[in-house]
Image (cartoon, helix red, strand yellow):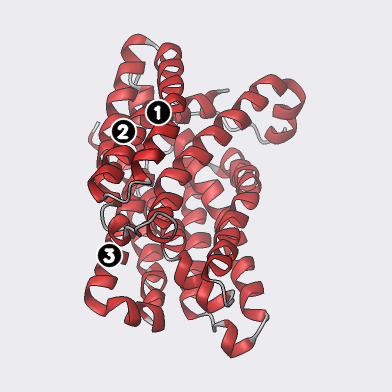
Amino acid sequence: MKQTKKSVLAALVGNMLEWYDFAVFGLLAVIIGHHFFPSTDQGVSTIAALGAFAGAYLARPFGGLIFGFVGDRWGRKAALRLSILSMGAPTVLIGCLPAYEDIGVLAPILLVLLRVVQGVSIGGEFIGSMVYLSEIAPAGRKYFYSSFAIIGILGGILLGSGVCALLFATLGEAGVLEYGWRIPFLLGVLIIAFGIWMRRNMDEPHVSLDKTHNPALEAIKHHKKALLFVVLLTAYIGVAFHTLFIWYPTYLATIVEPHIKEGLSYNFVSLLFYALAVVVGASMADKYGAKRIFVYSLTLFTVALYPSFLLANTGELWMAIAAQSVLAVLLAFSHALSPLTRACV
């Protein structure tokens, strides 16, 4: 049991460190847009940077296929250790990348290419950690164990939010704009070292690895309905989650009148509520079943979405935080069930 807990921690920490990299890009989108997609209109630059952020998502399914194949052929540990390496390297390179004013149009092209590599890596990491945690979980605790893949995401975003907030507090907006934005990405070198160290003694799940078939082709051929369900589930969770925790702070800082610049600093409040709700929702699913919890949480989240943004549009910080936190709790109950659902269909 002690070794299993260490393996859960290794999967959680690795996932957290990868999502830290992914989150920092979204949280610094305004500044990245200024350096790599310059425009007289700040909104255009920000949208272009968020487009590069979204571009990585086009690569995520390929990451799931590639690293899923590696995991089925050579084991889950091999796939998870490889994903850490392939995420850390492009993160460091983004921190070193010359801006548009230095090398012209080559700068945004290289940035997008590095984001694609990150997308492939995170696709393999998240899917791999979900499968891994579901396979080492004891009977009757599979939703709870697999939910730690989500806790890793939240930890990464919290870490990214904290680092960005600390940068603004110590360097000021001018300092972050000039050079400080590179610091979170350069910390990626620590991610590579720490991630590999954490995963050196992970348990290998006791599952038979079929090296005679292509699992991707088998899934497409025999599980079309299940794949469609997974695609729809992932689309719902992905759009809702990143709207809430990546776009929402930018929305408060650039669109809401009056601007709420503190939205980024207080992003952690709703993330803490989200993390707690994920654990509670997963535990309830183990005990009472997942279907009812999912339907109720999805319905309530959809109903609450529009009124919550109306509250944020008042320009009051505490109302914006309350609205985000309510949506976070409702979404978390759905998200808590998705790792095991996606790992097992």
Q: Tell me the SS state at disc 1.
A: helix
When asked about the image quadrant of residue 134, the answer is top left
Q: Nearer the viewer, residue 255 or 209?
A: 255
With 267 as the anchor, is 241 left or right in this view? right
Q: Which mark is residue 165?
A: 3
Name the amino acid, label 2.
Val
The three-letter code of the residue at mark 1 reads: Ala
Give the alpha-carbon distance from disc 2 to disc 3, as whole Å.
23 Å
Q: Please identify the residue farthest to the bottom as the structure is shown.
A: 102
Residue 280 image position (x, y, % from top left): 27, 25
Q: Is residue 76 visible?
A: no
Q: Which residue is mark 2?
A: 326
Residue type (three-letter) at the residue carrying disc 3:
Ala
Residue 272 sits above or below residue 185 on the image: above
> Mark 1 = which residue?
304
Image coordinates for residue 69, horizontal then vertical, percent: 63, 42
The CA span between labels 1 and 3 is 28 Å
The reply to whether the C-beta atoms of the residues labelled 1 and 2 are less than 8 Å apart is yes
Q: Nearer the viewer, mark 1 or mark 2?
A: 1
Which quadrant of the rendered structure holds the N terminus? Answer: top left
Q: Give how far across and how far down residue 90 sits, in percent.
A: 53, 68
Q: Residue at x 74, y 29 (%)?
A: 220
Whether residue 82 is situated above or below residue 183 in the rendered picture: above
Question: Looking at the image, which residue is at 52% across and 40% down?
Answer: 238
Q: If you read the primary sequence from the N terminus, does the residue marked by circle 1 or circle 2 appear first?
A: 1
- SS at badge 3: helix
**Mark 3 surroundings within 10 Å by alpha-carbon count, few (fewer than 14), some (14 through 19), many (20 or more):** some
Instruction: For the C terminus, give its image quadrant.
Output: top right
User: How many numbered markers are drawn?
Assistant: 3
Dot 2, crowdedness within 10 Å: few (<14), some or many (≥20)? some
- Horizontal placement of 302 versus 283: left or right? right
